[in-house]
Image: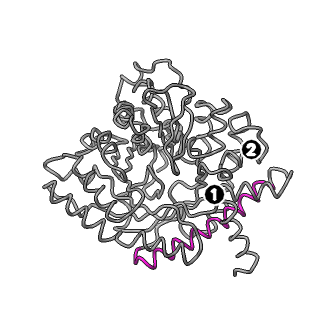
Amino acid sequence: MLNAHDILETIHMIQDEHLDVRTITMGISLLDCAHSDLDTMCTRVYDKITRHAEHLVKTGEDIEREFGIPIINKRISVTPAAMVLAACDNKDAIKLAYALERAAAACGVNFLGGYSALVQKGFGPGDRELMESIPQALAETEHICSSVNIGSTKAGLNMDAVAMMGRIVKQTAELTADRQCIGAAKLVVFCNAPEDNPFMAGAFHGPGEPDVEINVGVSGPGVVRAALAKAGDCDLTAVADIIKKTAFKITRMGQLVATEASKRLGVPFGIVDLSLAPTPAVGDSVAHILEEIGLESCGGYGTTAALALLNDAVKKGGVMASSHVGGLSGAFIPVTEDAGMIAAATSGALRLEKLEAMTAVCSVGLDMINIPGDTTPEVIAAIIADEAAIGMVNSKTTAVRVIPAIGKTVGDTLSFGGLLGEGPVMAVNPASPARFIGRGGRIPAPMQSLKN
């Protein structure tokens, strides 16, 4: 039961510590929109999205106003588009991208995710066509986000798809070089992608999900940092307990919003993703939490251990607060979206190799990292392969969202604005993995896959 202290504490978290609901995301299945005629399919896709998501933005705004809880983004995720494209005789994927863009604009959402393909074990009908269209689709649309799942613990790694994505990431950056290479910031490459993730750019509505549902992603790194600062010099067991209790409070707010949005929209409640998602705003940083725990700078020795403690405690506290937890759920470390990460990368304390080590113990992976514009597609593919291997072997979701900064080099800056933030171009090991990537084929699934 709520008391006055709980209410005042939540108000303080919202006003002074950047507590918010990062996103309400409506997941919509497009499987029943499939048709052999591409134009008919595109019309069905537009009609279904606009029919279900017509009131999504207004409902989010109403809840925000009535409850006083900031809801930063209203988004849509759809069935991986390659699956719908597979039924078409003419697989001109860019037409589907335009239909999705029109639907997103009509609904007034911030982003629409699901221009995606699932190719962890090989290419099905429509997969190659959609993947090859990604650079053009992201260059010529404003709201569309794209993802490709190239591996899983069960299937291993599809290295042909990895090589392909190295080239596609580079092409996407090149086509949007006049806009700070923004296209690559809307493209993520997964291993073990979840089907119910509400966060962009990796959100899609998996084939195992219901026809329509509401997923909510919460945030609140500033709240966790403030709670640790108030606690002073306690031991690490106490630190973990403080984080758990704080994560519980944050997630309860997300559960409230999810339940209310589900009721008002007449759509089933899916999950709450209890991730700590930072922003470039000062005081809303995962890196600053790690420094509050005791590090001089994020990226120094001890960072991986502190992040492991944080991620575990967030999950333990959050899972008790919601009836259904899913998505990614943990601590995000996107460099350009986190003020502390930006500072650490700019000073040289945080490097790409350390970020890779950190991804073994936290949510997602190498996220929003600017790399030199002359980085080769083979090096990008090898970065993807390394990160995917961490996910495959550890039975966790990992991802790569790197932005080749065309025309820029180490020390230069890319600035995207808004939640995507800005950050320095980070150094990349130039040693060539071309022969390794050129072999193609599949890296077999690990022993961990044999759990039946």
Report the front residue among 216 and 278. Answer: 278
Question: Residue at 56% across / 38% down in the picture?
Answer: 423
Report the front residue among 28 and 374. Answer: 374
Q: How many marks?
A: 2
Q: Are marks 2 and 1 in contact (CB under 8 Å)?
A: no
Question: Residue at 14% across / 55% down in the picture?
Answer: 36
> Distance from label 2 to label 1 (Cα)?
20 Å
Where does the image place residue 103, in percent across and percent down from the top left? 30, 61
Where does the image place residue 107, in percent across and percent down from the top left? 35, 65
- Mark sitting earlier along the chain (2/1): 2
Q: Residue furthest right?
A: 233
Q: Quadrant of residue 52?
A: bottom left
Picture colour scheme:
one colour
Q: Amino acid at mark 2?
A: Glu
Local crowd at mark 1 within 10 Å, few (<14), some, or many (≥20)?
A: many
For the residues carrying marks 2 and 1, which lies nearer the camera in this image?
A: 2
Q: What residue is shown with label 1? A: 315
Question: Residue at 50% across / 61% down in the picture?
Answer: 23
Quadrant for the N terminus, please.
Answer: bottom right
Q: Is residue 244 magenta?
A: yes
Report the front residue among 206 and 43. Answer: 43
Specify the segment rendered in magenta. Answer: 238-267
Q: Which mark is residue 226?
A: none
Magenta span main SS: helix
Q: What residue is shown with label 2? A: 291
Where does the image place residue 58, in percent across and percent down from the top left? 43, 72
Q: Amino acid at mark 1?
A: Lys
